[in-house]
Image (cartoon, rainbow, N blue to C red):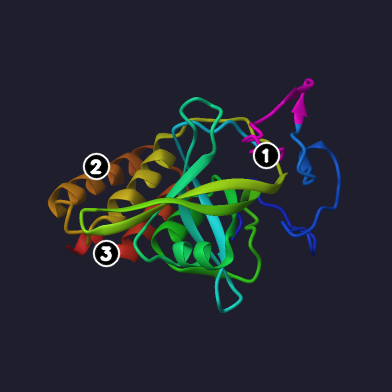
Amino acid sequence: MSGEGGRDRAAGEYPERSDGGDHARRSDGGAPTEGGDPVGSTDGQGVGWPVELCGVTESVVATLGPNGEWNLAALGLQGPDDGEGPVTARTWGRTRTRRNFEREGEGVVQFVRDPVLFVDAALGIVERSDPVDDAAHAWVRVATDRIDAGESGGTGWVDWRLTPTRRAVVRRVIPTTRRAHAAVVEATVAASRLDVDAYDESELLDRLEHLADVVDRCGDDQERAAFESVGEHVGWTDR
């Protein structure tokens, strides 16, 4: 699956290997620079994130499963409040991501703009032979350490510290703010809660109806296809 500005990737060009290359393709662990200033934060470990992370940033994470395939799933990255601490993430339930974090102790975080890929990763089961999708603008291999756990609304959760060990910036883009893209992301959150007893289904369906209207009015073909995929995964229009 290729997204905005997709490209072909040469064999071996994955997190396990650094091929060097120009500024936009660094994977040596150093911080890329623009105008002489570091881009992103080092998280105190020497290998930095490719962007400054604050609040919750949605990403796609690849984790290696026991079948030898990489599972792709949505993962919210929690940036440090003070800009100095580690980046963390929370997994809910006994998901593949949680089990693979526990078994392997690592994953590959990817920053993507492809809404169809994000929906499939958030709501479906996506397994690949390679960890990095062609749609990734950057990837970061992270070590995962369990730092807290608990339960909310009858569902267990685990908090993880994500420590970058390697990274690459594949392409740089001029940022744009698109209501339809944001609506697709929000739809995956509402859709994932439809069968959770702690949430009111009628409210979630109303929210999905509103988000569908936003995508219909403001979206492009890719965003509309992504929202249709939400319906295919959870069948919310038939509830």
Mark positioned earlier in the residue sequence (1 or 3): 1
Question: Up-down: is 5 above or below 32?
Answer: below
Amino acid carrying label 3: it is Gly
From mark 1 to mark 3, how far is it between C-alphas?
44 Å
- Left or right of 4? Residue 89 is left
Can the viewer see residue 209? yes
Q: x%, y% of residue 131?
A: 63, 62
Q: Which mark is residue 210?
A: 2
Please report the bounds of the magenta region as a residue range. Answer: 33-49
From mark 1 to mark 2, how far is it between C-alphas?
43 Å
Element type where label 2 sits in the image: helix
Amino acid carrying label 1: it is Gln
- Crowdedness near tag 3: few (<14), some (14–19) or many (≥20) residues, C-alpha within 10 Å: few
Disc number lying in front (1 or 2): 1
Element type where label 3 sits in the image: loop
Q: Main secondary structure of the magenta part?
A: loop
- Left or right of 17? Residue 225 is left
Rendered image quadrant of residue 22: top right
Q: Which residue is mark 3?
A: 235
Rendered image quadrant of residue 151: bottom left
Question: Up-down: is 208 above or below 236?
Answer: above
Q: Which residue is mark 1?
A: 45
- Left or right of 207? Residue 129 is right
Determine the residue positioned at 61% across, 53% down.
143
Determine the residue positioned at 77% across, 58% down.
13
Q: x%, y% of residue 120?
A: 45, 60
User: Are the residues tagged 1 and 2 within 8 Å (C-beta)?
Assistant: no
Find out whether residue 181 is within the magenta segment: no
Question: Up-down: is 53 above or below 97?
Answer: above
Amino acid carrying label 2: it is His
Determine the residue positioned at 75% across, 60% down.
16
Rendered image quadrant of residue 35: top right
